[in-house]
Image: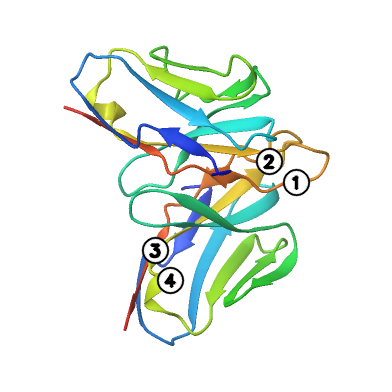
């Protein structure tokens, strides 16, 4: 499978626990993006990487959130001390950045439920 | 007021009908995207356009940069077209074209 892969697909956690999600982009894609989507809303941009460098973070990304892409390949998004408001779909996308515009491919998302 | 507004929010159609979903935006953009999201969450990119019109099968997307408006048309709609259709824009920043601002989506249901 050469698409964007996200794991796990679903995660249920108790409030206060830490969770980590993984995104494996398409192998030749150097840009990777994280989005969050709450019920009934469109996704919201969280952060993006070019290779291993995190180039921008949304103010939505509180101190409890951290994202990494250590070798410029897969990325992880960790949420510490989860809150019920963190319940959402977390989406990852990747594309290959060139001087032109290239379309991105999205993963299936990780649905987080904080109980 | 959201930077990206879609209408209608919900749309029910009979199989075979011609469908139009509209998107208006209020910021300068480098590109506009139409995305499809099925139950379960996965998103598929349908179109990315910065001017004019694009066609793929039964789907047509148009954009009017001056009016800051785009439309997605589905001809000969089919129940398998039932999904949420999302409009998103890449702000004109010279940076990442996928730091997107999304609309809330249009839930399309096509009945047989």
Q: Which residue is mark 4?
A: B81
User: Which residue: 43% across, 87% down?
Assistant: B16
> Disc 2 is attached to a residue of which chain?
B
In this rendering, position of residue A15 left or right of residue A54: left
Q: Can you say whether B96 is above or below B106 in the image? A: above
User: Which residue: 56% across, 32% down?
Assistant: A33
Q: CA distance from mark 2 to mark 4?
A: 27 Å
> Disc 3 is attached to a residue of which chain?
B
Q: Which residue is mark 2?
A: B97
Q: Nearer the viewer, mark 2 or mark 4?
A: 4
User: Which residue: 39% across, 57% down?
Assistant: B38
Query: Whole-percent x and y of residue B41?
Result: 38, 48
User: SS for tag 1?
Assistant: loop
Q: Which residue is mark 3?
A: B83
Q: Are marks 3 and 4 in contact (CB under 8 Å)?
A: yes
Q: CA distance from mark 4 to mark 1?
A: 27 Å
């Amino acid at each position: 499978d050469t698409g964007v892969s996200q794991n796990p697909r679903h995660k249920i956690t108790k409030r206060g626990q830490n969770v980590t999600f993984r995104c494996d982009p398409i192998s030749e894609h150097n840009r990777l993006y994280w989005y969050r989507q709450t019920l009934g809303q469109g996704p919201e941009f969280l952060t993006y990487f070019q290779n291993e460098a995190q180039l921008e973070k949304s103010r939505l990304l509180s101190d409890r959130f951290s994202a990494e892409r250590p070798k410029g390949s897969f990325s992880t998004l960790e949420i510490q001390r989860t809150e019920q408001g963190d319940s959402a779909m977390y989406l990852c996308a990747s594309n290959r950045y060139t001087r032109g515009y290239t379309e991105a491919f999205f993963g299936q998302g990780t649905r987080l439920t904080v109980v | 007021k959201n930077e990206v507004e879609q209408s209608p929010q919900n749309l029910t159609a009979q199989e075979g009908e011609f469908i139009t979903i509209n998107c208006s935006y209020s910021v300068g953009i480098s590109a506009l995207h139409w995305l499809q999201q099925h139950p379960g969450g996965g998103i598929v990119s349908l179109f990315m356009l910065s001017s004019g019109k694009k066609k793929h099968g039964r789907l047509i997307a148009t954009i009017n940069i001056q009016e800051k408006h785009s439309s997605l048309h589905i001809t000969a709609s089919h129940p398998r077209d039932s999904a949420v259709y999302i409009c998103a824009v890449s702000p004109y920043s010279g940076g990442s074209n996928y730091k997107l601002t999304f609309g809330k989506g249009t839930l399309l249901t096509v009945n047989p």
